[in-house]
Amino acid sequence: MKKVLSLVLAALMLLSALPFFAYADDKPVKNVIYMIGDGMGENHLEWTKKELGVTLTMDSMPYKGYRITDSLSGLTDSAAGGTALSCGLLAFNSNVGTCSISIGSVGVVIANYENLCEASQRMGKKTGVVTSDSNTGATPAAFSAHTAARGEASKISAQQLECGLDLLWTAADGIITEESATKAGWQFVDSMDEIYNLEPGSKSLAQFSGKIQYKTGNEDDAPLSELTNEAIKQLDNDENGFFLMIEGAHIDKYSHSNIKEDMMKSLVEFDKAVENALAFAEEDGETIVVVTADHETGGITPDGDSYKFTKGSHSRANVPLRVYGTDVIVGNGETVKNVTVARNVSKLIGNESPFPSYSFAPNILGSIFKALFSLFKK
């Protein structure tokens, strides 16, 4: 416990020394499409291309590098990985948009981190989260909630109803209902037909009846590529622009199970979503597209003239980082720290407020760390 407390204090002290920049001399980026292939490592891409004989659109993006994924716990989970991508700050495993001490599914928040959706909302931008997971999955939660532990699904869902997003399209979590969503001011939808018929700019919450499509060719559920198109249409109606996070969650799920065929189908569908995002960005001229992963799953390694899974869990392998529209986030062949992507996105959109940013929790532990933090800063 002493080591954990020391790490928390060290992390927050480090933040106090960070320089805060704004690109005052450059025109801020209007729109950001932030795409996360959960569990997607570089060897996932290589194996899929070799096995299926396909090319991937994300490989055509002009800036291609890598991102380190470690959390304060070392080998990251999806919650801390999502928090680094959304907030530009390190967290312990299981933390969602916070720095917290957690045990299992419960914990105590020390500090709440601001995420990129919240920063974008302060700037008057539209914001949206789309995922092939449920809304309480670790990655979408990191862009829309703040909890000590990823297992606090009821807290996450309650916060998401009030989080200020303009759209939240996910598989059903079994907690949010049409009644609770409507009461909170959302237009509730649960089918692609309803998505297609939404009025542009409406505040919509989708809870699809089953898991969103993760296999190419499955017509029963909502394809991530189509959801990407429709989400852009919904958000692209404001002079201040938008921030949209898209997650392909099933790359990770099938990598945990070491099912290569379904992992590859999931990756191809995610790449179709990337293709649609890039098509919009190229036509629009005011949009950057960032494609990366929160971590690698499966420990995929070369095996003769092919590849193989070596584990059913996460690894510490660096993950792909592809960018369209700017060379600020990564240079070709460069490896960047996991927190720098969110920080650079914040700079690029012209955020003049400090980012990353945090506030101590209004509890005993938060008060103690606030006092210690003030003492050590003197």
Image (cartoon, helix red, strand yellow):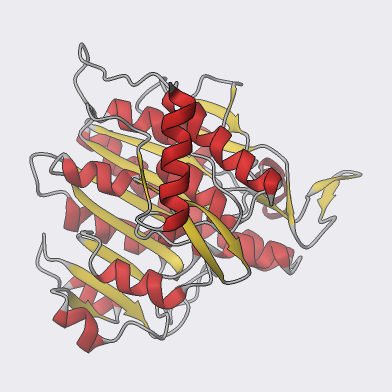
Image height of 106 relative to 348, above or below = below
Image height of 211 relative to 370, above or below = below
Between 110 and 98, the one lying in front of the other is: 110
Residue 37 x/y as whole percent: 53, 52
> What is the residue that sits farthest to the right in this orientation?
304
Image height of 301 relative to 94, above or below = above
Residue 342 x/y as whole percent: 41, 36
Please report the residue visible at 68 percent of the width from the left and 54 percent of the height from the top: 52
Horizontal arrangement in the rendering, residue 45 relative to residue 87 (left or right) = right
Please report the residue visible at 69 percent of the width from the left and 52 percent of the height from the top: 1
Please report the residue visible at 57 percent of the width from the left and 72 percent of the height from the top: 105
Q: Quadrant of residue 88?
A: top left
Between 162 and 49, the one lying in front of the other is: 162
Horizontal arrangement in the rendering, residue 203 relative to residue 79 (left or right) = left
Between 16 and 86, the one lying in front of the other is: 16
Horizontal arrangement in the rendering, residue 27 relative to residue 335 (left or right) = left
Residue 302 x/y as whole percent: 84, 43
